[in-house]
Amino acid sequence: MTLVLILILNLAVGVCIGLTGIAGFLLPMFYTGFLGMPADQSMALSFSAFLISGVLGSVTYYREGNLAVRPAVILSAGSLVGAVAGVRINLLIPENVIQIVLYVVVLLSGISILLRREKKEQEREKRKTEETAGGKSVFYLLLGLVTGAVCAASGAGGPVLVMPLLTLLGFPAHTAVGMSLFNSIFIALPAAGGYLIHASGKQGLFLLLVPVLAAHGIGVAAGSRNAARIDQLLLKRIVAVASILIALVRLFL
């Protein structure tokens, strides 16, 4: 029964990640809060799933033309270094402190997205953002460093923080999802490796990996293939409202 619940949740979370980029944070919450799984095992399973969702989702978004490659690569270079530090931070700083920082930023990002004035010409906004990306290389690198560290330390997959921030910076919603999924690969790689090594002695961990990753991958593939059907403005509002609700629940309940 436990395995069935894990597979259903991974399938559902995968669909949500494919559609909007967010929802990955539910996996470690479910593993530790509902199943009572040790933190390192929970993180190992979660970040392994985030690696799959990042690869599958970003490929689909790239094919659809919704991935700004240059800023995504720079952002991800910073996240790779940040995630390595984040795994170590998790062992030094209480997880609840990291999560407070994470969800305060998510809350503020969601509010800002709702308050931000929409531009009428989305394509012009996209081109402007990509054209100025070269001058923002250091900024994207630092942003990736910080978000990678916070996400790897807290158990968030990455998009729950990165996607609303990219939207706030002016990237179209679908592009922000594609970039955040690509970025999550470089957060998940060191995080999954670090937590898998730390939890390698846990019985049954590696037996769970194959069915969990398969269910998660099917969900992501289904979600990302249908994401283009969601209007940009609607997607922004969905992400903004979801970010606010997620942050409030995690901060106060």
Image (cartoon, helix red, strand yellow):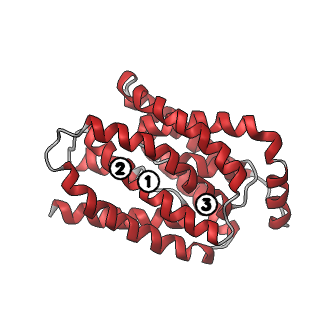
Residue marked by disc 1: 51
Q: Earlier in the sequence, mark 1 or mark 2?
A: 2
Residue marked by disc 3: 178
Give the quadrant of residue 95: top left
Q: Please, what is the three-letter code of the amino acid marked with disc 1?
A: Leu
* Residue 239 position in % (x across, y down): 58, 58
Q: Observer-nearest residue: 194 or 178?
A: 194
Q: Seen in the image, is 58 located left or right of residue 131?
A: left
Q: Please, what is the three-letter code of the amino acid marked with disc 3?
A: Gly
How dense is the environment of label 1, judged by Cα within 10 Å: few (below 14), some, or many (20 and up)? many
Question: Pointers 1 and 2 in contact (CB under 8 A)?
Answer: no
How dense is the environment of label 2, judged by Cα within 10 Å: few (below 14), some, or many (20 and up)? many
**Residue at left offset 46%, top offset 48%:** 157
Circle 3: element type: helix
- Asked whether residue 132 is in view, the answer is yes
Circle 1: element type: helix
Q: Which mark is residue 46?
A: 2
